[in-house]
Image (cartoon, rainbow, N blue to C red):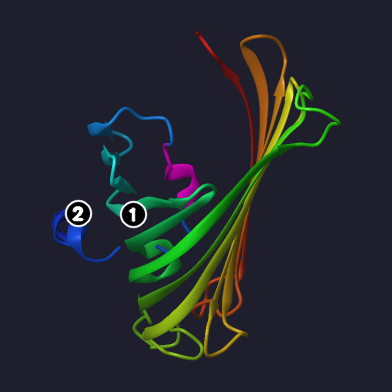
Amino acid sequence: MKQHRQTLFTFILSMIILGTASISAQVNTESLRKTIQEPGFHLNLGATLNMMDGNRNLFQTQIKTRLDQVQHWGHLFLVSNYKMSSKDETVFVNQGFAHLRFMRGLSPGYTGEVFSQLEFNEFIRLKQRTLVGAGVRFKYSGFTGQDSNSKAPLSMVFGLGLMLERESIDIGSDESAGDPVHGDLAELLRSSNYFVVAYALRENLNIQSTTYYQVDTQRFQDYRVLSQSLVVVGLGKRLALTSELNVRFDSEPPGGVNAWDLEFNQGLTYKFR
């Protein structure tokens, strides 16, 4: 436990240092964006802590932080998330990330961005992944019907960018679990591209999909894909059925780690206002 408390301290310290430097891949940063904000400084903090002692020893904690600075010159935000869970002194979740991004409008529909990120995840042998990059995004909004009164609005976002990435892998005691090409350390330039589409088929049926494609600019066979899709079906004015499908693929995963990850979630949401 002492080692993981040190990891938490190191991660928080790194976030402070990286506030002006670097931070990552395979995180859906579209879900981190906030477009409706008043000018000024905004801060959100959240933390959860669960402990059980006795016949079962369980410890879970999660810390979330978000800082936004919105001014006429652009939008700067920093988001961090740390999660750790252990049972009977055995840690089965220890992961975190921090993402820093600056956005500035260039012309109608176009936005320039500079970003950085830090990430670690013991479950997939990722000791640390840091990156810094820049790109441009284009947003299109329109209607699929015959006139502007159509109830089928369509919104699409295209993003193109480049990022310098440094990835450190836990290769294990037998040194067999490293990257199949780079071993325990990979330093490369990736192209980071994404496509987002939001489509309201009917008033009570909305679909949103976000897909990332990140490829090594020197070796096209080394790439990662992240796809997250959400379908919301309205069951009334306040109640909705949600279905979410997340798919991740790494063409060259570390030894002992599956190339594919698939997650499906379904639930109900209720709006009080």
- In front: label 2 or label 1: 1
Assign a secondary structure to mark 2.
Answer: helix
Res. 92 visible in picture: no
Res. 222 visible in picture: yes
- Magenta span includes 30: yes
- Magenta span includes 145: no
Assign a secondary structure to mark 1.
Answer: strand
Indicate which disc, 2 or 1, sits on the residue closer to the N terminus: 2
Where's residue 195, x and y in %? Answer: 62, 56
Q: Is residue 190 left or right of residue 49?
A: right
User: Looking at the image, which residue is at 43% across and 84% down?
Assistant: 178
User: Looking at the image, which residue is at 37% across and 77% down?
Assistant: 164
Residue most toward the front? 107
Image quadrant in which the N terminus is located: bottom left
User: Looking at the image, which residue is at 53% across and 72% down?
Assistant: 257
Mark 2, Cα crowd under 10 Å, few <14 / some 14-19 / many 20+, is some
What residue did someone put label 2 on? 8
What residue did someone put label 1 on? 101
Looking at the picture, does residue 45 appear above or below residue 233?
below
Mark 1, Cα crowd under 10 Å, few <14 / some 14-19 / many 20+, is many
Q: Which mark is residue 132?
A: none
**Magenta residues, as a range?**
28-34
Closer-to-camera residue (83/244): 244
User: Looking at the image, which residue is at 57% across and 82% down?
Assistant: 222
Give, as a three-letter code, the residue at label 2.
Leu
- From mark 2 to mark 1, how far is it between C-alphas? 22 Å
